[in-house]
Image: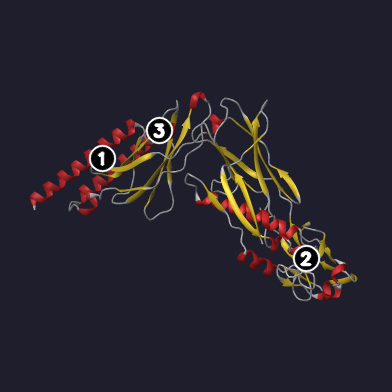
Amino acid sequence: MHRRINRTFGGYSLKFSLLEHLRDASSSGTDAGINSSGALELDTVWHAWIKYSCIVQIQTKRKTANLFRKMICLLFLFHCAAGVLSSSTQVATIYPQDPALPIGSSLTATCSVNPDHGIHAGSLYWTLNGKRLPSSTYSILSPTVLSITLPRLSGSRQRSGDNLVCHNSGGHVLAGSCIYVGMPPEKPVNLTCWSRNTKDLTCRWAPGGQGETFIKTKYTLKYKLRWYGREKECEDYSTGEPYTCYIPRDLALFTPYEIWVEASNQLGTATSDVIYLDILDVVTTDPPTDVTVSRVGDLEDQLTVRWGTPPALKDFLFQAKYQIRYRLEESSDWKVVDDVGNQTSCRLAGLRPGTVYFVQVRCNPVGILGSRKAGIWSDWSHPTAASTPHSERLLTGSCDSKVGQQNSTLRRDLKQFFGWVRKHAYGCSGMSIKLYDQWRVWLQKSHKTRNQVGSSRR
């Protein structure tokens, strides 16, 4: 017979039927999943569950998400299953149950069979993670108790623990225990935090030592206002990055925080050093936007870089300083320009003619809401490529060797002079760039004039 149960959950009418055959399986001990050797026949129960499943019907006047229906169904399935298994006769027990041990330890475990089932300890055997263990490690302590000794245990193969199981002669599972073999956590290190809008905070750290404990280790980021706040825990670890937690709201400004990380597992706990920070001192931004690189007329050794202010902090009172880095297309070595200041453009000079360059820009917010400290450098922008013009002096030559020698001497002297100017006026200074531009234009015009005169004579 079926037992019909009607329940109401959150306004939904839940109707499900469950065969009494499963509910009474363990009490009868026969014809319902308990074999003659006392082992619970999981296959029998499983097929019974398939044949006589828990039928859930959710009736509602409005649309209901499929996920919600599945969650309700699973909830009652687990409830029903727990009722069946918990009422079954206990055939055997393993001691110790779910122990946690340091790597290198030895373990002696016992499997004690219920005398009512008439099973002798000599007919039992052990498996670890599904692999049968040699009988040389067994000891029969009594007609109903079989022990096993596992020496010099190595780290668990799975963080959920290694499965030590006691079987009867037919291979049926009588009892099981999870063994956790690993190391206590070491002190987390390299704790750093940053904010992208002065309202949130993201923190990242690294596990101490080699980082591997072989068993599940929980990391908890904790924080509090330095002098009077109560301790809080970060809850959002779903950022996609390991050892990272995100605090989205409810942070105070102009007041330092204490922040630290606690690591814990079944073998111990460890706590990182405490860091102290004001949210305004760890503000960062997205990389600068709309980065463009263009030529400077026909000047073959210069490029102009322009970019936009990062959008995230346009509503805040702050200044920004920028860095530029560039490299040759065929090179992996970057050259960094540090002295850009808060400009949103800069001229790169002294480049190689006829060459492709990759350029990136990043930003560091300064003086946000009156903070005296600089923020944190943003990531670099995506690389932007541009090429310098080809040099006409490399494409056309002069037949007058004396003129060539004079031009070579002039260029060497001017190069030394403007090298001195750039060294003392610094990279993006308007004065040095202006003088340099005037000299380059004059040199190119004079070169073209000489080429035209030489061509007319021929």
The disc, 1 or 3, on the residue closer to the chain's N-terminal end is 3
Q: Residue at x 85, y 66 (%)?
A: 114
**Pointer 2: what residue?**
28
Residue 167 visible in this rendered orientation of the protein: yes
Q: Secondary structure at mark 3?
A: helix
Give percent across and percent down for residue 13.
Answer: 57, 47
Relative to 432, say whether 292 is above or below: below
User: Which of the two marks, 2 or 3, is nearer to us in this view?
Assistant: 2
User: Which of the two marks, 1 or 2, is nearer to us in this view?
Assistant: 2
Give percent across and percent down for residue 432.
Answer: 33, 33
**Pointer 3: what residue?**
424
Distance in Å between CA atoms under marks 2 and 3: 97 Å
| In the image: residue 131, left or right of residue 294 | right
Distance in Å between CA atoms under marks 1 and 3: 19 Å
| In the image: residue 101, left or right of residue 454 | right
Q: Secondary structure at mark 2?
A: helix
The disc, 2 or 3, on the residue closer to the chain's N-terminal end is 2
Q: Residues within 10 Å of mark 2 (few under 14, many from 20)?
A: few
Look at the numbered discs 1 and 3 and tell me whether their residues touch, using CB distance below 8 Å. Answer: no
Total marks placed: 3
Quadrant assignment for the N terminus: bottom right
**Pointer 1: what residue?**
440
The disc, 1 or 2, on the residue closer to the chain's N-terminal end is 2
Q: Residue at x 69, y 61 (%)?
A: 20
Amino acid under disc 1: Arg
Question: Is residue 71 or residue 142 the one in the foreground?
Answer: 71
Amino acid under disc 2: Ser
Q: Residue at x 61, y 58 (%)?
A: 54
Q: Residues within 10 Å of mark 1 (few under 14, many from 20)?
A: some
Residue 102 placement: quadrant: bottom right
Q: Residues within 10 Å of mark 3 (few under 14, many from 20)?
A: few
